[in-house]
Amino acid sequence: MADTYKRVARTSSSAAGATTVYTVPGATTALVKKIHLSNNSGVSGTVKLHHVESGGSADGTNVILPTVTLGNNEQAIDDGPFVMETGDTLQILADGTNAITINVYAAEVV
């Protein structure tokens, strides 16, 4: 299988607490190149991003984007890049407003 650059995750921040957005597949390394956060909901929402090593949990030691508050029609972009290994996860901590849409773009190297 060839290395593939693609959108690896697309979701909305619909739940309060940590939610896994992306898990690196087995025998794969992911080079995360861009994370795009946008809010088109009409209400403000907050989100924080964590790069959690395999078997770990979202905490203060693995924050990659501190809490961001986005009003209606606002966006934030993290241009990385950073490397994730097999089993690592990208997790969001959101306020549960279902306001923030998250798109993650990465190159998966097998």
Image (cartoon, grey):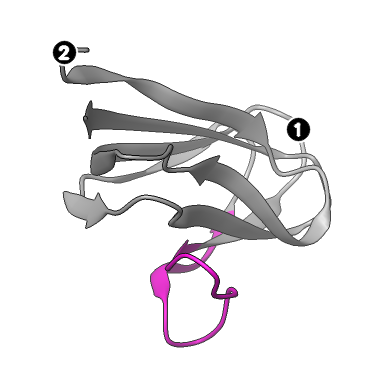
Cα–Cα gap, marks 1 and 2: 41 Å
Left or right: 92 with respect to 23? right
Q: Is residue 79 magenta?
A: no
Left or right: 44 with respect to 32? right
Specify the segment rendered in magenta. Answer: 50-69
CB of mark 1 within 8 Å of CB of mark 2?
A: no
Amino acid bearing label 2: Ala
Residue pushed farthest bottom? 60
Q: What residue would you read off at disc 2?
A: 2
Counting from the top left corner in percent of width and height, residue 95 is at: 77, 60
Q: Quadrant of residue 46?
A: bottom right
Q: Nearer the viewer, residue 12 or 85?
A: 85
Residue at screen point 29% across, 38% down? 28
Q: Which structural element holds mark 1?
A: loop
Instruction: Name the mark on residue 42.
Output: 1
Amino acid bearing label 1: Gly
Counting from the top left corner in percent of width and height, residue 66 is at: 45, 71
Q: Nearer the viewer, residue 84 or 47?
A: 84
Label 1 CA crowd tier, 10 Å (few <14, some 14–19, many 20+): few
Residue pushed farthest top? 1
Left or right: 94 with respect to 5? right
Q: Which structural element holds mark 2?
A: loop
Quadrant where the image shows the N terminus: top left
* Position above or below: 58 against 1: below
Residue at screen point 27% across, 37% down? 34
Residue at screen point 71% across, 49% down? 44
Residue at screen point 52% across, 41% down? 22
* Position above or below: 10 against 32: above
Quadrant where the image shows the C terminus: top left
